[in-house]
Image (spheres, rainbow, N blue to C red):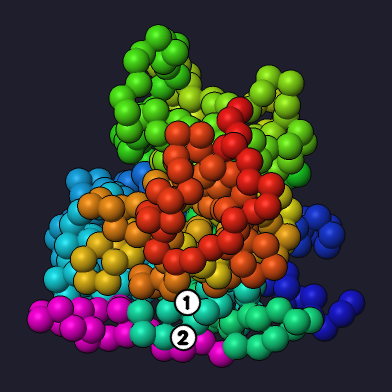
Amino acid sequence: MSPALPRLLFSVRKSPLVTSFNYTRTLSTSQTILAPQFLESADEAVADIKSGSKLLVGGFGLCGIPENLIGGLLKTKVDNLTVVSNNAGVDTFGLGLLLQQKQIKRMISSYVGENAEFERQYLQGELEVELTPQGTLAERIRAGGAGIPAFFTPTAYGTLVHEGGSPIKYAKDGTIAIHSMPREERNFNGRNFIMEEGITGDFALVKAWKADKAGNLIFRKTANNFNHPMCKAAKVTIAEVEEIVEIGEIPPDQVHIPSIYVQKVIQGLGYEKRIERVTLAQSDAGNKELSPAARMREKIVRRAACEFQDGMYANLGIGMPMLASNFIPPSMTVHLQSENGILGLGPFPTKEEVDPDLINAGKQTVTAIPGSSYFSSDESFAMIRGGHVDLTILGAMQVSRAGDLANWMIPGKMVKGMGGAMDLVAVADTKVVVTMEHTAKGGKHKILENCSLPLTGQKCVDMVITEMGVFELQEGELVLTEIDPDTSLEEVRAATGCSFKVADNLRQMAQL
């Protein structure tokens, strides 16, 4: 017998449950001191978390957040926390409650979103915020859990994330007290990449649907999101679940997280499962008279829908881009991917179909079509970064003549975060289409010689669609290829803050 075998069997021999030994079966079924603990309450589960800890907190928006464990932290009042999470919930729920109690020192996130207190604390210098592209954040966590200290990614090359200087903490006078550091860069096969470091934490607080009594976990629909990679990247993973089932009720080939990654499990006492944006199917939308602003947006959206092709995979951003899906012809199949973990987005639900575990990247309630699939955030961005998504349509604050894009912050005034936009536009094989109004309030130019706002991506835009027409980037030049029939070329020139070429075969703006 191998001299190592007695040491492997030590914990088995101590167990009163074992009366005989079959080496193969005993080693795989023994209960050891390292097996997950099943605890009675969230308060007990978070009792070991001390002030100054680094926490990985799962969820996307309010979907799949560990609301009971967050409630436990609200009672302990531990502070000076560093929290890694895609966002921070809303002002009155989720991590927003920890922000209200000033328990968080630093957030490492991709998106501030609609959390006004998050934005206020950041801009007032009360909170450190390390904004990280969503796909990079997911991959940093995945890498950390896999023992990979760093990796190279094309995401964010040429932006503040790469060059450094992004504000992490503001001083009281509005100056930058702490700024981000530059990333190492390298060229591989003619493409530029930057280096990002893996993320690990002291504790991971995650929400799963079910755990079996061995500690294996499964998630439900889009509540998988960041929970999956975070389970693997912390010294101690604490999982709260809706249901604890017997061993065998989760088939081994359907386990999402093996028990080796899980140290503590609680069954939540109840789940509020708030939804940020309950969005329902509008059966009578076609009977409503549109306002002038809505007609303008529909014109842009109908043109964007012309970019769909049968069988393609597409990712649609928040707002106008998502509306383009309303005009996909019935004879055409377009597979819509959402970065929070779904391939096969369906229409908005009826009131009866609303499911808090099924949302899109805009936090809206959705449905899924037959043949759809759910997956984690790191898997989602592997699809995106790997060039498997054919088309992305997103909004913009500014686009430059060279195709640079800015859409995530106005320094010192407004910060929503880059979310997944930097990842989506960094892929060489994905067509990037921008939909936006041609000018900002007061007629301020949005198509410029150079972007004045922090970049989302460098030379990444392939097409810009506005209410006035369509611009395409052709051989590094901005070219007007289509014009709205009610707009003159002189009006387009006046509304555009840079020079551009006019196609020899300038066409009337298409509509689907």
Residue 144 is situated, as x and y percent measured from the top left of the image, at 57, 74
Q: CA distance from mark 1 to mark 2?
A: 6 Å
Give the tally of numbered discs. 2
Q: Residue at x 15, y 78 (%)?
A: 174
Q: Nearer the viewer, residue 436 or 217?
A: 436
Query: Is residue 505 at all visible to an observer of this figure?
Result: yes
Q: For the magenta stretch, what is the residue range?
A: 167-184
Q: Residue at x 23, y 84 (%)?
A: 176
Q: Residue at x 45, y 43 (%)?
A: 488
Q: Residues within 10 Å of mark 1 (few under 14, many from 20)?
A: some
SS type, badge 2: helix
> Residue 149, relative to residue 204: is it above or below?
below
> Residue 159, relative to residue 266: is it above or below?
below
Q: Are marks 1 and 2 in contact (CB under 8 Å)?
A: yes
Residue 42 is situated, as x and y percent measured from the top left of the image, at 32, 51
Q: Nearer the viewer, residue 394 or 237?
A: 394
Residue 76 is situated, as x and y percent measured from the top left of the image, at 20, 61
The residue beneath circle 2 is: 163
> Residue 89, relative to residue 48: is it above or below?
above
254 relative position to 219: left or right: right
